[in-house]
Amino acid sequence: MEQIDIDATDIKLLDLLQSDATLSNLALAGRVNVSPPTCLRRVKRLRDAGLIEREIAVLNPEKLAVALGRGLTALVEISLDRQGAEQLEAFEARVVPDDAVQQCYRVSPGPDFILLVQVADMPRYLALAQRLFTSDANVRNVKTFFSIKRLKFEPKVLLVQ
């Protein structure tokens, strides 16, 4: 992985953009005290380097659940029988592309994976569990925690303390 040199201005830009990606280039430039062309070049360099992965709208799943009349969020711990590179990669290849899997982490110690999944309802969770976990002979244990209330969700990388 290629390392990119970033300075305090880049860090300020990244921090501002991850809080509000709708800020105009002019507004960004003013907040970090650089000219608009300089700001544009810096943001492009940060995007090209992959530090800015993508810009998205963050939706509120609880409000959507009320509006749609459904919604279920679950945290799932997965333990595998065999943790060789091939078995870990096979599990990742199966779960990562699934649209219901919002986040997937390989962790240590404890379970091998923790997934955050979002489905419409319990029957859809059951279908997901059968599709991704039950059908895999290498899955030893599945432990699911269903969210009853989201207290905090902050999709920011801590840059400034």
Image (cartoon, grey):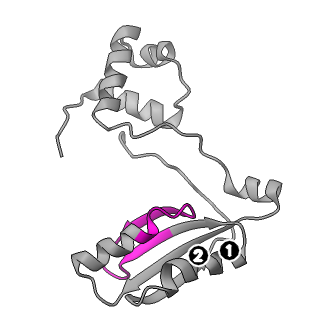
Contact (CB < 8 A) between labels 1 and 2?
yes
Q: Please report the bounds of the magenta region as a residue range.
A: 94-115
Tell me if residue 35 can be seen.
Answer: no
For badge 1, the amino acid type reads Arg
Dot label at residue 124: 1
As displayed, is residue 28 above or below residue 49? above
Q: Which quadrant would residue 85 be assigned to in this image?
A: bottom left
Dot label at residue 51: none
For badge 2, the amino acid type reads Leu
Residue 79 in magenta stretch:
no
Q: In which quarter of the image is the C terminus?
A: top left
As displayed, is residue 157 above or below residue 101? above
Q: In this view, does 106 lie to the left or right of 149?
A: left
Camera-side residue of 58 and 134 = 134
Residue 103 in magenta stretch:
yes
As displayed, is residue 62 above or below residue 131? above
Label 2: how many residues lie within 10 Å, few (<14), some (14-19) or many (20+)? some
- Residue at the image point whose x is 20% and y is 34% from the top: 4
- Residue at the image point whose x is 36% and y is 39% from the top: 160
Disc 1 versus disc 2: distance between alpha carbons? 6 Å
As displayed, is residue 38 above or below residue 79? above
Please give the residue where the numbered disc 2 appears in the rendered image: 128
Tell me if residue 142 can be seen.
Answer: yes
Q: Is residue 35 left or right of residue 147?
A: left
